[in-house]
Amino acid sequence: MQVTEQAIRDVVEQVLARIELPSPPEAAKGPCGCTLSPSGQCTCSDSAYVGRYGLFTDVDEAVAAATDAFEQLSQRPIEDRKRIISHIRRISIDQSVELGTMEMEETQIGRLEHKIEKLKTLGEQTPGVEFLSSQVYSGDHGLAVIEHAPFGVIGAITPVTHSLPTITGNAVSMIAGGNTLVVNPHPSGRRVAAEGVRRFNQAIYEDLGIDNLICVITEPTLESADAIFHHRGVKLICVTGGPAVARAALNSGKRAIVAGPGNPPVVIDETADLERAAKAIIQGASYDNNLLCIAEKEVFVVADVFDAMLDAMQRAGAVRLNASEVDALTSVAMTTVGEGQHLHQVPSKDLLGKDASVLAAAIGKQVPESTELLFGETDEENPFVSVEQMMPFLPFVRCRDASEAIAKAQHYEHGYRHTAIIHSNDVRNMTQMGRVMDTTLFVKNGPCMSSLGLGGEGYLSFSIATPTGEGVTTPLSFTRERRCSLIDDLCILGK
Ligand code: NAD
C-alpha cells in the first residue's frame, strides 16, 4: 500500500473512533455561578470583584466588611454621607437606561420605560441627610438635644419587582442615617442588584476611600436570608416583599422593619369624577404592569355609576374583556398552590408582570401592543379580586352603595393595612373609608403613586413599612433616638 497523506488521515480517524475519549470535565463554576475560564477566572463582571465593591458570596464575610465600613463611616462628618449619597443618586439617574434595561432583561417582568423611570425617580427624590433634624427642649432645667444615631449594619431583603430600585432607595435612606447594609436580593434580580451595588461602591471608594458600604450577596438563597436574619453583627433588618418573607422577618427575633404585601382596593361612589377616576386608575394600575405593591388591584363601584364608569375606562384607553374572556383569562392567569386547608391561588409565573397585550394573546384576543390595561366586570369570588395579581387586568365589582363598596374593600385588603384608594367628592364617604380601612396609605382622587409624592405631596420610598408601622420609610426610620441632657445650663432665657 502506498503511504499517502490521505491514507495516514484515514488510519488516524479509525484509531480515534475506537478510543473512548473521556468526556470533557464539567465546566467549573465561579462563586457567582458563572462558568470559569480555562485559567480559573470568573467570566462575569460580578465575580471579578468578589470581596470588593460590595460583592460577597458569604454572609459572614459580607457582614464583616459592612461592619468595617460602618466603623469608617462613623469617623466621617455628615457632609461625607451627603457625598456618598450623591454618587448613588448620580449613578441611579445617569445610568438609569443601562441599569433599567439590565433589570428588564434579567427579570422579564414589568415595562422597560418604568424600570428606567423608577431608578431615575428614586435617585432624584429619596430623602437624604436633610431629613435628620434634631429636636431640642430647653427650660428651667437646662437643655436636652435629641439626635438620630445609626443602628450599624442593616440586613435588607429586596423583591424581584424592583430589584435595584429598592436597593437604591434603601441605600440612600440607610446611609443617610449613618448605617451600612447587607442585601439579600431576590434570586431572579440578583445580577442587576450586584451590578448596581458594584457601581455605587466603586464610585464611593474612588472618591472617599471607603469600600463595602452596601454589600450584596451575589448568590442569594433562603439560607443566606436566614443567615442575615440571625447574624449577631446585623442590628436591624428591613424586608420588602410578600407574605412569606414578612412572616419570616417578624419571627426572626430581631428588630425588623417590614414592608409587606398589599392588595389595594379602589372604591368609586356616585359623586366621583368618573373621567378623572378612569385616568388615575389606568395610570396607577398599569404602571410597570401592576407590579407596584401600592397599585390598584380591584375596584368596587356603586351600582348607580357602574356602567358609566366602565364606559369611562374604555374612553380613557383601557380594553374591556367580556364575561367569557374574563373567565378564560382567570383560568390561565391564576394557579392553585398549597395543600389541604392551605390551598390558595397565586398569579401564574408566565403572566405575572407581562404586558396587557400578552395577557390578551394568552386568551386568543388581539389588542394593540400599546394597550396599558385590561379590565372587566367580575363578581367578588373571582380570584383577581382577592389575589395580588401583579398583572395589568383589573376586576370591577358592582356594589349596592358606598357602604357595601367600602365593606368589600376592607374585606379584600386582607387586613394588610397597606394602601386603599377612593374616588369621591363626598367627604363622609372619604372619611368612612379612611377610618374603616386603617391603611398606611389612603389616596383620594388620584393614582396610587400620588401617595408617594409622585403627583401628590410627601416624600418617596419603595419600602413602605406596613405591619411594623414605620410607613413610607425615610432616613429617620433607620435611626435610634439618643438624648443628650445638660442640667441647669445653656438655657439662656433667664430665670
Ligand atoms: P417575594 O416575597 O417572593 O420575595 C421578596 C424577597 O423575600 C426576595 O428577596 C425573596 O428571595 C425573599 N424571600 C421570600 N420568602 C422568604 C423567606 N421565607 N425567608 C427569607 N426570604 C424570603 O416577593 P416578590 O415577588 O419579590 O415581590 C412582590 C411582593 O413584595 C408583593 O407581595 C408586594 O406587595 C411586596 N412589596 C411590598 C412593598 C412595600 O413597600 N410594602 C414594596 C415592594 C413589594
Image: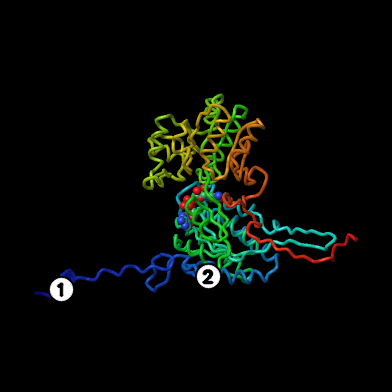
Q: CA distance from mark 1 to mark 2?
A: 59 Å
Q: Is residue 200 shown to the viewer in this render?
A: no
Q: What amino acid is labelled 1 in the image? A: Thr
Kindly identify the residue that appears in the image at 52 percent across and 25 percent down.
307
Q: Secondary structure at mark 2?
A: loop
Residue 302 spot, x, y in % from top left: 55, 28
The mark lying in front, picked from 1 and 2, is 2
Q: Which residue is mark 1?
A: 4
Relative to residue 397, is residue 220 depicted above or below? below
Give the answer, above or below, for where 293 lies relative to 28: above
- How far across and down, in percent of the image, does residue 428 sit? 66, 32
Circle 2 residue: 52
Residue 454 is situated, as x and y percent measured from the top left of the image, at 63, 45
Q: What secondary structure is marked by label 1?
A: loop
Residue shown at the point (54%, 41%) measured from the top left:
264
State the quadrant of the C terminus.
Answer: bottom right
User: Residue 58 location in percent, x, y?
Assistant: 47, 68
- Is residue 449 among what the camera can see? yes
